[in-house]
Image (tube, rainbow, N blue to C red):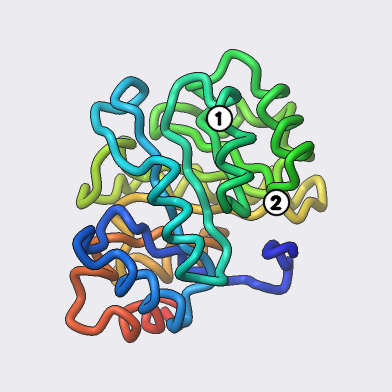
Amino acid sequence: MSYLCPAMKRIISPSMLSADFGHLYRDTQMVNASAAGWIHIDVMDGVFVPNISFGFPVLKAIRRATDKMLDVHLMIVEPEKYIERFARDGAGLITVHFEATDDLDVCLNLMREYGVQTGVSIRPATPVSVLEPWLDRLDMVLIMSVEPGFGGQSFIPGSLDKIRELRSMIDARSLDTLIEVDGGISVANARDLFDAGANVLVAGAAVFGAPDPTAEIEKMLRA
């Protein structure tokens, strides 16, 4: 099944990094019943970023609790070693970091081989222009609007300019590539992000810290 429908202009992908790990099934079921289109899984190795998060058993448990796409963000070095396993364990889209691999072509080829959608992410200091050679092979580009590795950070305002630049690159080539943004996202900036050209917003603390998470997701979609 393909989850990347060009008609889907706005998608919220709640980050399970901000869920209650003691009630992971409950929180996954809540997101599954919500208006969120995807579920975001942050995988950190303690090397590329100074933190460690989910592994394969957690991914498989979340996969069993939802029928929505698992949007798997690999913040790990040498991601090419693990793409097959993440694909097998339930990822629908895999995003690797441009800065974390020496061979992006290998990563993209493996994603296609194992039947998952292709994504590449860039850190705040990395210009979007580095992705130009691969843009027509990407289903999605993830722009980090905070430094990767920790939840709850403040949005970097300059990220809006990067979104606009990337949107211009995509539109100039008449591509269907989606733009995802991750970091410091809430109802307060959702409209600005969508207006700048983003399609997918990753929200963690703003969703799971809200009194009514499902209502918060709907507010972002309607921003």
Q: Which residue is mark 1?
A: 82
Q: Which residue is mark 2?
A: 177
Residue 205 visible to an observer of this rendering: yes
Foreground pick, 79 / 152: 79
The residue sitting at 50% across, 70% down in the picture is 66
SS for callout 1: loop
- The label on residue 29 is none
The residue sitting at 33% across, 20% down in the picture is 47
Callout 1, which amino acid?
Tyr
Q: Quadrant of the N terminus?
A: bottom right
Residue 135: x, y in percent? 72, 37
* Quadrant of the image occupied by residue 134: top right
Image check: 41 left or right of 155? right
Residue 196: x, y in percent? 52, 59
For the residues labelled 2 and 1, the Cα–Cα distance comes to 24 Å
Callout 2, which amino acid?
Thr
* Quadrant of the image occupied by residue 106: top right
Q: Quadrant of the C terminus?
A: bottom left
Residue 166 visible to an observer of this rendering: no
